[in-house]
Image: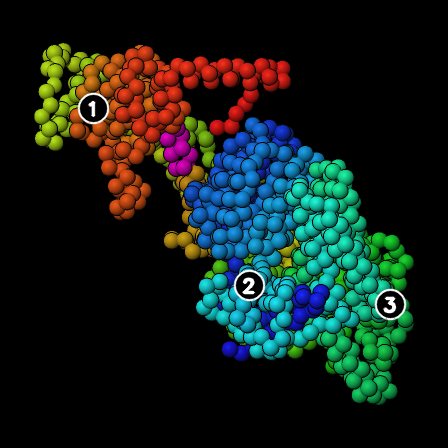
Amino acid sequence: MDAVQSDVKYFNIANDKNIVTLKMPEDVITKWFEGKRRELKLYIILDISGSMAGSGLNQAKESILKLMEGLFNGYVLAEKDITCFFFQSDCEVKRFADDPNLLWSNGAIRNYFAGVQSYGGTYFDPVFEKIIEQLQGIDSDLAIIFFTDGQGGYSENTKSKLETALAQTGFSTEVHTIGFTRSHDATLLSWLTKLGTKQGNFQYVQSSGDIPSTMDTTLELLELGDRTLYVKIGENELLPTGFDVNGNGKLVLTGEAANIEGQKISIFKDKDGGENFDIETAPIQVHSDDPLATLLTVPYIQFEIMRLTNEIINNKEETRQRFNEISEEANAYDEKLNNILQSAFKTKSIMRNELIQQCMETKGTILQFKDILSEALKGTLTNQKIADFNNLAYKNITNQRLKKKLDDRTIKNIEKMEEVEKKIEEIVNELDFDELEAQESEDNLLTYTCTVSTDNYIDAMREGECICLTLDVGRSEAAIADPSQITIKKINQTLLSSGAFLNSVAFALNDKNNAESVHGGFQRETFSASMLKGLAHENITGILPLYINEKHWSIAREKIKPIMGYLVTLDMFGYAYSQISTVPFLVLARALGDTSSEFKKRQAKWILETCDAIYKQSSTLREDNKKLFENYMKSPANRTIDHVPNNFVFLSHLFCALRCGDVSAQDVHRWLQDGLMKFLIEETIRRRLNKWQFIEKSMEDIAKVLGINQKVYIDEPIEEFEKNYAEYFNFISFDKNANIHYVDSFKKALSDSGINIETVKEDKEEPMDVDLTKVPELPTVKTILYDSHTYQISDYANSIITEIKKAVNMLVEINLRYNKIIESTIADPDVSLDSSEFEFIEGKTLLTDAFFNKYSSKVILATFLQSFLHRQNSVRREAIEAGPPKYHEPFSEDTADKLISTHFDEYVSSTLKKKTNDILSAYTNEQNSAIGLKFWQTDKVEEAAGLLLVDVQFRGRKVYGQILKALQRPSMPLAKEKIEMVISGAWQGITLFMDKPRGSNDPKQLEKFIDNAHWFPSRQKVYRMLKAHKSVIPDIDYWIRVLPPFKEYLEHQFDEEYLTAKRQARFAERQNSPSGKRIKRNK
């Protein structure tokens, strides 16, 4: 196999220990996994004990819901991949996969969590056991999030079983733990984070208000998408190793395995071998003066300190000699960090500040670790100290993991940026600036002048710099992976040279203590920052190199790389090509927000020319977009955020593709005629409605949105049904002497089986007063469905339409401004953005108003409703793929009625079904109680058997529970016979129940089911039956024959000496307990 883009590097951290980095081609990973994200299952484990009552549990539930929303929106997993464990002294498991209606889109998950309440004490064994049980069916990578606020009981045996079960899954596992308040068991939670094959994360939350931020961190960790592959070095065993999406992996080798020189290194897709990639290049040794050595060493030390900490807190029997050895190890790591710091302070490396920061954070961890060690030696190590230390140490490790993506890019870009500087130097040496200046107009030299240095663009070029438009930008950390997440707040009128901007950044950062006040950090759009003020006193936090002419662009196209890296990631070496193919096009969209002056029109023209230059120079982008434009029109599935991260960038690319001839005017015109702008606008609205709390709350009551008259469509049909069903139920329940049919049914079963049993002849029954041949029909509920002729949009729906329009008006306006420009370009390819026809005023939405005015309120409601219901990409895809499709064309008179009627009728039908089921359930419960009472009361054995045969039939039915309750009530006629027939499932050779095993095709399962001999009640029910009937059935042999699994228990219950001794022991135990209180025991 081709070994291009692969390598192995190793750093000798100690005599017998190497840290090894591996790189394999991204296209190999793409081929192996078909470009799909790793499959991930999630266990969310929530402590619902009594101490969590109130704000703690409410905040925890809301945070978990926020986490789920992020996971669904980011396609990390789907609802079916989540299992929740709610634990206190017991544990309830809720597998979302078992309930197809438990979805995020229909609000069912949020409603389910609303019903989760706190009660009981904290005991960990039940939840550990449930996790072990669920692990048996795991078929993909697994992440576990463990949240608790208390210290509870657990057994070492159960802990050991959990550790073994996680190790044996055969998949990548990670355990993240969150300790809430000072009372959480820091030792246990720290131990849990070590159980997975991947390093877990520990977070300590001191108050309920901090919980949402912990979920944000957890979400980021789950989104990393690392895969576990298997590395084979020489003839050694396969080593599970985490690889990120870029194909980078890392592992630590010790002893003889650390010697990798001359060894064949292969990476396998699975632990069983099979597909593999051979790295054919020889391993490269990393020397101690290489920045990579430090980037490998510091995280290694962090993990080693955590390892030593866990050894201290989990091994109470450590000797003083071992403590001294641990102390020496920590001191050695501290000294290593000191050496790295000395070198870092002396170096002029671009990574100097990053190295110093990492070292100082790790030294802080070591300092706290020494405090932990001292407390352990004195025997005064508290839960609070462990929690504080874990919180600091894991936070540093987590930050490093989240920054790894950027760090990998930084290392890769160091050489690239050096090449950029060399290339610029070559360009500068080749240019004849005197000739260029002589040919340039005074107007251009004056226009393209740096405000700070007063150099014109040619003077800037002499220094290897370029002239740039200044910006005010905002960004979140998500922009590191997706540059479309950057926000262009404003385009300024000030021009700067690239050198003046970067020098201003350096000066401002040195002059101010708070770096975020200079560049804005990874803050919200509303956060105000500035490195210097522009001509109009505007904030400047970014720049965009301009295309002025080809010679200026030859430098600008190189300088734009570190500038984009800084703009998006706050690190010049954080550059990625996606930034260049995204950010300038976002700036173009922002420019179209206001072209009300001649200068702003000229700015828009400069930006467009810059975007043209970028677009033309990228053959890959151009080819990819040709396919994207065509596919966009083929299916709504090709319009979601995973295909088109930003609609404005998409439109900017389309405009540039049209201008450079990559797409024909005829094709673009056809796309517009086929509804391109409608699709873009609907997609823009759909994305805006996602994560908008106001609209989610407003849309919660779908009946109110659709204007469904509750009285007409729901209440009156239900009242009529309930009345009719009451009459029907009363009729079929009439049984003055109808119990005879139970006897007849049992006799018929005897006759059919050929068994001859002598039965007692019953007295002749009196004739019934009711003619049972005239049985009324089973009533049905009258359903009134949607009628397009009478349907009216409600005032409430109109108010929602107004609110959504307000929120999306400007976004839609930008789409339509692109539409106007593109249509004009189709008509006249030479049209320019500084034309008077493209005078757009900021805040004015004339095009949007005209667009919405074309459609009726019904069409707009239908489109907005579909956009809201499909606001999550996974739901939109499911709707498209459904048969028949649940996606309808937006802004269409033809589909508006169909869409509204679908949801109208679905609400009416589902609500009526639920309410009728509630009515039927109430009558069924009443009937089941009556059957149970009838079974208890009857003094005819054949009637009792017939009742089980006719009205119960299956042990799995609810009515069977009433039969068991009857067995536990005293004074029951025929107690001996009834207990035996219920337990054995047979009477006089007739099988009374028709249950089948789940694996009915499995002979072993079927064998266990023969004669129902496998089923027995719980010990609690046995105790209650015995208590109720021991006086009338004093024969112990009978009880043992009927209930053989409880032989020892039954013998004890009939042993008076044993019972007396047990009662005395309990009395003594209560006497010795505090305040004489009853001691609660675990079952």
Judge whether residue 976 can be spotted in this image: yes
Disc 2, SS: strand
**Contact (CB < 8 A) between labels 1 and 2?**
no
Q: Tell me: residue 627, above or below residue 1053.
A: below
Q: Residues within 10 Å of mark 1 (few under 14, many from 20)?
A: many
Counting residues from the N terminus, which is met first, the one under dot 1 or under dot 3?
Answer: 3
Left or right of residue 1074: residue 1003: left
In this orientation, does residue 930 appear?
Answer: no
| Residue 920 part of the magenta-drawn span | yes
Which residue corresponds to the image point at 56% horizontal and 36% vertical from the top-left? 154
Q: Residue 376 in the image: x percent, y percent?
A: 74, 42
Is 596 on the left-hand or right-hand side of 949? Answer: right
Q: Nearer the viewer, residue 748 or 194?
A: 194
Amino acid type assigned to the residue bearing label 2 in the image: Leu
Residue 767, position as x, y percentages in the image: 13, 13
Q: Is residue 963 above or below residue 107?
A: above
Residue under pointer 2:
239
Q: Nearer the viewer, residue 482 or 20?
A: 20
Disc 1 residue type (three-letter): Gly
Residue 946: image tag: 1
**Residue neighbourhood size for the residue with mark 3, other residues' Cα within 10 Å, grouped as few (<14), some (14–19), many (≥20):** few
- Which labelled disc corresponds to residue 346? 3
Q: Distance from label 1 to label 3 (Cα)?
A: 94 Å
Badge 2: few (under 14), some or many (20 or more) residues near its Cα, within 10 Å? some
Marks 3 and 2: which is nearer the front? 2
Per the rendering, the mark at residue 347 is none
